[in-house]
């Protein structure tokens, strides 16, 4: 029997191949435009292909997002460096712009009659706590005598007290030994402005005078030093005193703490 099967093995293989071929042909029958084998393959491998397609799309989108974030970070870093450089340039240029603005304001100060304005560099303040002095350097090309008024764009700074070469010692309006004839711009009430070290006190104004906080005091011209109409300060405190005289405190009009340039109102001498 085994010999019979062995001798007929080729015929059996041929028969199995023929049956398999016929089965394959049978499975090739189309159903709605799709073969049975194609449908079977799609059913078996469809989830795998879908998962692969999703993974590939996710990887591509992730890579694109990484490139976009990297470019955005590089742009942000470049903008940050540019902003830092611009801020540094602004810090360097701003003091020059401020000084230029102050010089322009000095040029706009109208000179009093028969007075020549000479620009000077404010070098330093000194003398505290016993005095309030300012050292000024300028080259006026003509003698500058003691009591020459010194101004800034906002008002009275002080007056020249002494000189050495091109350096001038200026007695500030806040010095206790300084005295300036003043009056209110609103009512014309008159008095004498005397420094108290930091601010200015106005003496010899009667209690009946109409003076209020916020009133601006200007030079009256009665002291023979300062021409009339130059701002001295603004009243920040006004009260009636027990000696029939008002107690008035002024905030100086000139920026005495931040002076860089001043003008000397040089008078003509025969």
Image (tube, rainbow, N blue to C red):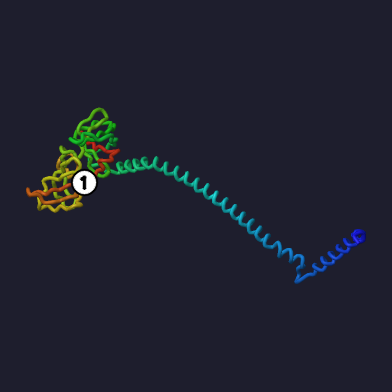
Image vertical order of residue 66 relative to residue 11, above or below: above
97, 165: nearer the viewer: 97
Q: Residue at x 18, y 40 (%)?
A: 197
Q: Is any part of residue 166 visible from this angle?
A: yes
Residue extending furthest toward the front: 1
Q: Quadrant of residue 128?
A: top left
51 sits left or right of 157 in the view: right
Does residue 230 appear anywhere in the picture?
Answer: no
- Residue at 68% across, 60% down: 48
The residue tagged 1 is 251
Q: Residue furthest bottom?
A: 32
Q: Position of residue 254 (x, y in %)?
A: 24, 43
Left or right of 212 in this view: 18: right
Quadrant of image for the N terminus: bottom right
Q: Quadrant of residue 22?
A: bottom right
Residue 86 horizontal side relative to residue 218, left or right? right
Q: Residue furthest top?
A: 165
Whole-percent x and y of residue 223?
15, 40
The quadrant of the image that shows the C terminus is top left
* Rendering coords of residue 46 (x, y %): 69, 63
Where does the image place residue 199, in percent across and percent down from the top left?
A: 19, 43
Would residue 25 appear left or right of 45 to someone viewing this image? Answer: right
């Amino acid at each position: 029997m085994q010999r019979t099967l062995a001798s007929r093995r080729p015929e059996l293989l041929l028969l199995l191949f023929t049956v398999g071929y016929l089965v394959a042909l049978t499975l090739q029958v189309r159903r709605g435009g799709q073969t049975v084998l194609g449908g079977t393959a799609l059913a078996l491998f469809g989830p795998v292909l879908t998962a692969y397609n999703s993974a590939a799309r996710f990887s591509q989108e992730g890579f694109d997002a990484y490139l976009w974030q990297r470019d955005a970070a590089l742009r942000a870093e470049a903008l940050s460096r540019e902003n830092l450089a611009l801020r540094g340039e602004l810090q360097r240029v701003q003091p020059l712009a401020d000084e230029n603005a102050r010089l322009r304001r000095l040029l706009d100060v109208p000179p009093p009659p028969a007075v020549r304005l000479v620009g000077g560099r404010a070098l330093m303040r000194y003398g505290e706590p016993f005095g309030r002095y300012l050292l000024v350097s300028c080259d006026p090309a003509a003698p500058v005598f003691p009591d020459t008024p010194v101004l800034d764009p906002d008002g009275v700074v002080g007056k020249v007290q002494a000189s050495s070469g091109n350096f001038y010692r200026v007695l500030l309006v806040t010095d206790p030994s300084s005295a300036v004839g003043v009056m209110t711009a609103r009512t014309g009430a008159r008095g004498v402005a005397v420094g108290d070290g930091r601010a200015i006190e106005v003496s010899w104004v009667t209690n009946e005078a109409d003076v209020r906080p916020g009133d601006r005091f200007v030079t009256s011209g009665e002291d023979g030093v300062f021409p009339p109409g130059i701002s001295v300060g603004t009243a920040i405190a006004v009260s009636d005193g027990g000696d029939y005289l008002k107690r008035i405190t002024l905030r100086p009009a000139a920026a005495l703490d931040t002076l860089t340039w001043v003008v000397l109102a040089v008078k003509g001498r025969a």
